[in-house]
Image (cartoon, rainbow, N blue to C red):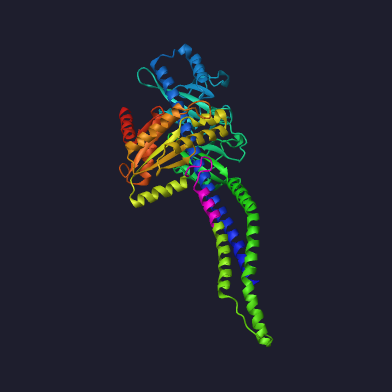
Amino acid sequence: MIIIILVFSAVIVSFALSLTIGYTTQKKSLTENTLELNRITANELSRTTQTIVQSMQDTLKSASDYISSGQWKQEDLQHQIDFLRVSVPYFNSVVLVNEAGVVTATSPEALALKGTTLSSDQAKQALQLKQPLISEPYTAASTGRLIILASSPIYDAQGNYAGFIGGSVYLQEPNVFQKILGQQGENENGSYYYVVDSNGNLIYHPDPKRVGENVSDNAIVKLLLSGRSGQMSVVNSQHVKFLAGAAYIPAVGWGIVSQTPAVVVTKSVDAVIGKVALISAPFMVILLLIVIFISQRLSSPLNRLAHLASNLTSGTAKTVQLPDIRHWNYETSELYSAVNEAFRLLDRRAEEYSHQAHTDPLTGLTNRRLMDEIVARWAAEGVPFSIVMMDLDRFKTVNDTYGHQMGDEVLRFLAGRMLEEKGKNDYCCRYGGEEFVFLLPYRSDDEAYEIAERLRGRIESEISPTGRPMTLSLGISSYPARALTIEDLFGQADVALYQAKQGGRNRTIRYDEAAAAEAGNEADH
């Protein structure tokens, strides 16, 4: 009976321990993946926002140059700024201000600001600095609106300062950020993103009522205010825990935060482990019944010995026949085999959990966590290798046009072509989002380039799940031929990938080529 209880307890404890390990591993993996996905989302949105800001500045600069050159006639100024406001999607209103701060023209004219003197600190700052400027959010005294003022100085034909042309973005009304970043609806899992300025004020938020609110006490916002990007678990002002990724926008000192409620991860892992436990329970019951049966068989020789000992003690036994020692060893080995089988079953479950923790669930490729372990091991062992970092061009358009399910099909489509192109010892990894990586041991960057070009050509020529071909941009670097550290290796590949994007997409760039191109661009500037 004691043996049965011990075995029963051992199996139950092992099963519970297996589920606990699986739960912990799965939750850690999903948390890391969610943080990484939010970081990637924030990075993509930061690039978009920086492009918007730069385009706003470029538009105003072009307009001020036209005014300075005299191509905008005084009698046509109203028509011209009306045309500027309507033809570009950036500004809710446009004003011309002379060097004394007096408004000389507005669009729309309904603002009734013509002839008035601007008194806001932001307008005075633009007049004083006499250089392109994007202000912090402030409430306009004339309209009571929360706005951002972008301005560019104007000079007359003799080079004298003549005022500025300014464009206003109404933060609490339909504006360029809402159009470009997208109106966020109710996300099924509660994820959302927002934009803060250099003082921690909300510039864009899915809840318009919160625009203008200062959230500088938020830990992830503090990271942005220090000029850094990153990811972390945070508790927001409503005391809700989120898994957040943040990206800094260096052009204006703003930042973007993309975040997902932490409870989403917990619920997802609970559901997975619950299903595992439900599926495993019948097998565990059957296993326990088998163990009990074998335990009874094991105790049979001991019962016979006890009965014989009792007879000998009472003096009723006439002869003594000891149990066959080989029979005893056989019964013991049977029980040992059964227990071993139970642990092997649990080990297989642990291996399955480990596989899940190292495999991207959407594409079936190696996930970021295992990829990092592989490259760290190769670096420690002195294995030379190359990496190909790739990114689907305009993948956001696929999600926006066809939906995220089609986006998932496109990612699986790319993953399948990667597996077909990889060598026996190569690894195909999902780096995050629509970014993937080839790990190519003992291959030079020339060999990596050939593989990358074959894959790029296939993606370009084959019909994707969207019904049309897609394109890839790829960046290549090698260790230790190009990079002396793993961090430098991925940084170089990312630079090359970025150069491929900047160069028109649908191309493969090796790091040395990317560096040369970047140097050329800097020389042009």
> Where, quadrant-wise, is the C terminus in this rendering?
top left
> Where, quadrant-wise, is the N terminus in this rendering?
bottom right
The quadrant where residue 204 appears: top right
Q: Which residues are magenta?
A: 347-366
Q: Nearer the viewer, residue 262 or 494?
A: 494
Does residue 503 belong to the magenta stretch?
Answer: no
Does residue 358 belong to the magenta stretch?
Answer: yes
Identified at 59% across, 33% down, the residue is 184
Q: Position of residue 157 (x, y in %)?
A: 36, 17
- Relative placement, left or right, of 246 versus 7 is left
The quadrant where residue 191 appears: top right
Q: Position of residue 331 (x, y in %)?
A: 59, 69
Q: Which residue, as the protein is rendered here, is positioned at the far front?
A: 319
Q: Nearer the viewer, residue 512 or 302?
A: 302
Q: Nearer the viewer, residue 199 or 390?
A: 390
Q: Nearer the viewer, residue 376 or 88?
A: 376
Identified at 44% across, 46% down, the residue is 371
Q: Is residue 20 above or below residue 112?
A: below
- Residue 99 in sight: no
The quadrant where residue 452 appears: top left
Q: Position of residue 260 (x, y in %)?
A: 57, 43
Q: Is residue 371 above or below residue 44?
A: below
